[in-house]
Image (cartoon, rainbow, N blue to C red):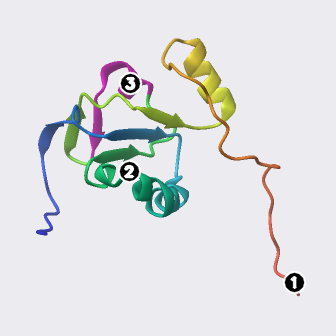
Amino acid sequence: YNWVSDVHATVSAAGMALIFSTDGNWHSALRKLLEKDFFQRHPAVRQSYLITTSPPISLAQLKSGRVKVGNVMFVDAQPHLVCGPVGMVSSLGSAGHLEGESIPIVKTYGSVILKRKG
């Protein structure tokens, strides 16, 4: 492929197979999930997906379907899936921005600091 570092465009995401919005930097876990599981079961999606990791989940994207990535404006980009802390997802659902069932995907026991021995 050809690599271009400066692109300005407006692109419709209406035909994308998967639009996924997260509340932050989940890309390392998502990459593993997509590569090792999801794309194996749904290979066509590999060629047609958009993931935004802007903290928090963009309410403007949910409402308008518009999200800007660098100099590229995506329109018709309402997420099919969102991922975030239960409180944020619940508040988006209560405000009428989500439909369908919420599914827990991670269980946490809080933040920890690891110190190297010695």
Q: Sequence order check: which comes first, mark 2 or mark 1? A: 2
Question: Could you tell me if the residues under marks 3 and 1 are in contact, i.e. CB atoms within 8 Å?
Answer: no
Inspect the image, locate mark 3, and give the three-letter code of the amino acid beneath it. Ala
- Which mark identifies residue 60? 3
Residue at which label 2 appears: 42
At horizontal 50% and vertical 35% (from top left) the residue drawn is: 82
The segment highlighted magenta reads 59-69
Q: Sequence order check: which comes first, mark 3 or mark 1? A: 3
Toward the viewer: 110 or 16? 16
On the image, which quarter does residue 102 sit in? top right
On the image, which quarter does residue 93 sit in? top right
Q: Position of residue 45 (x, y in %)?
A: 32, 49
Residue at which label 1 appears: 117
| Horizontal arrangement in the rendering, residue 84 relative to residue 104 (left or right) | left
Inspect the image, locate mark 1, and give the three-letter code of the amino acid beneath it. Lys
Could you tell me how far apart the alpha carbons at marks 2 and 1 are, in whole angstroms?
Answer: 44 Å
Q: Helix, strand, or loop for circle 1?
A: loop
At horizontal 15% and vertical 38% (from top left) the residue drawn is: 11
| Horizontal arrangement in the rendering, residue 51 relative to residue 30 (left or right) | left
Q: Between label 2 and label 1, give the one nearer the viewer.
A: 2
| Horizontal arrangement in the rendering, residue 97 relative to residue 43 (left or right) | right
